[in-house]
Image: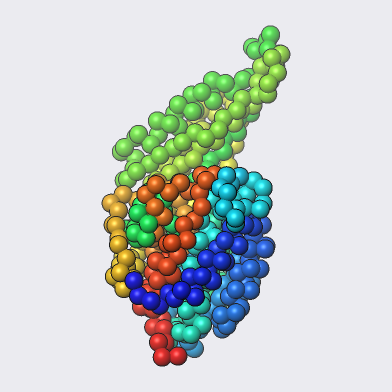
Amino acid sequence: MNDIVTREILDKVTGLRRSLHQYPELSGQERMTAEKIKDFLQAQRPDQLIEGLGGHGIAAVFDSGNKGPTVLLRADLDALPIDEVNNTPYRSRHQGVSHACGHDGHMAILAGLSMILRDRKPGAGRLVLLFQPEEENGQGAAKVIDDKQYKGIWPDYAFALHNLPGFEKNTVVIKEGPFAAASKGMIVRMQGKSSHAAHPEQGLSPVHMMTELIKGLMRLPGENRLFKDFALLTIIHASLGNIAFGTNPGKAMVMATLRTFLNEDMQVLRQHAGEMVKLMGKKHKIQVNINDTEDFPATINDPSATAIVQDAIRKSKARSITIKEPFRWSEDFGHFTSATKGALFGIGSGKLHPSLHNHDYDFPDDILKTGISMMYHIADQLVNTNKNV
Ligand SMILES: [Zn+2]
Ligand SMILES: [Zn+2]
């Protein structure tokens, strides 16, 4: 690996990573995290620093002042409502909250890049280092894109990485086309009429509709003729009435997560699920109401952006794996790849490393160097950093 990522940079960002890890904040509450990032970035003298982007988002702009593309690199600010069980000196000081997805590491990687940019400004176009809020609930990317301030930094290219347990440390994981699935939460509320449990015939329990609906929804992804690619529907929650042995229930609720590799398949899956709910409501004379939540478009890697990542792999002298199947999880980076050419790639965090969102997960600091090098070489291809400064 080249030595653009110096020991000084690694020591500094390892310290930053651990201090972010100690004080994790939930989606939408990333106030202290954003302050810390802002202070760090300010010291690297960006040409512009944007605050309050889509909530607590921060963006540092390194602008050549010359013609050229605007390139956005994204990290994420938020942690998860998970109680950390690790006993490191820098373990989470916020009870019930931890950086169990490694966003502390993603932030440290872009912070490391900002240290390189202090001495090597872009020679063409602009480079935007975006620290995005609310990734975990799928709202942050859309909020950033909708923010008025984003118009001023609208990118021609966008890139992001995610660390990936289950892959060898420092192996870059890439794929052209669909990389991570689209997903959507669906909440179905059913309203009938409650009655005395001794007289169910006087009420209208949604129990029949509920059981029929659960089975029907679960069968939908198996209807192969409907979908071009992978589709999945997982029932994640269901409830019927209240716990009262004297009462025949009058309401029910079913929640499901829908997943597909293609955005068009998500539309089809959601449409068929919605029609099924309405038809069954009519049949059982139950009032129905559907709400969608946590909407993640599929992350689709653009061919030219993927080629740029592949070149950065060579320049970083990193090992790499081209996966055949997209990941089934979702990333709200899909909002960026829906709006702009871009690519998401992975960096292995260890074959046996605890999985993301596990209570014993902790971002491995020894993949920071690969992350910084990858981001630098991606940016350098597009904005041509000035090596002589
Ligand atoms: Zn996560
Ligand atoms: Zn994550």
Residue that protrudes farthest toward the top in the picture: 198
Asked if residue 220 can be seen in this view, the reply is yes
Instruction: Give left or right: position of 203 versus 389.
Output: right
x then y, percent, for residue 82: 59, 45
Q: So how many labels did they put on this image?
A: 0
Instruction: Give left or right: position of 383 versus 285.
Output: left
Q: Quadrant of residue 359?
A: top right
- Residue drawn at point x = 28 percent, y = 51 percent: 324
Asked if residue 264 can be seen in this view, the reply is no
Residues 190 and 35: in front is 35
- Residue drawn at point x = 31 percent, y = 49 percent: 325
Quadrant into which the N terminus falls: bottom left
x then y, percent, for residue 127: 48, 77
Quadrant into which the C terminus falls: bottom left
From this view, report whether residue 293 is shown above or below residue 389: above
x then y, percent, for residue 248: 66, 17
- Residue drawn at point x = 53 percent, y = 50 percent: 100
x then y, percent, for residue 207: 57, 21
Residues 254 and 329: in front is 329
Residues 172 and 329: in front is 172
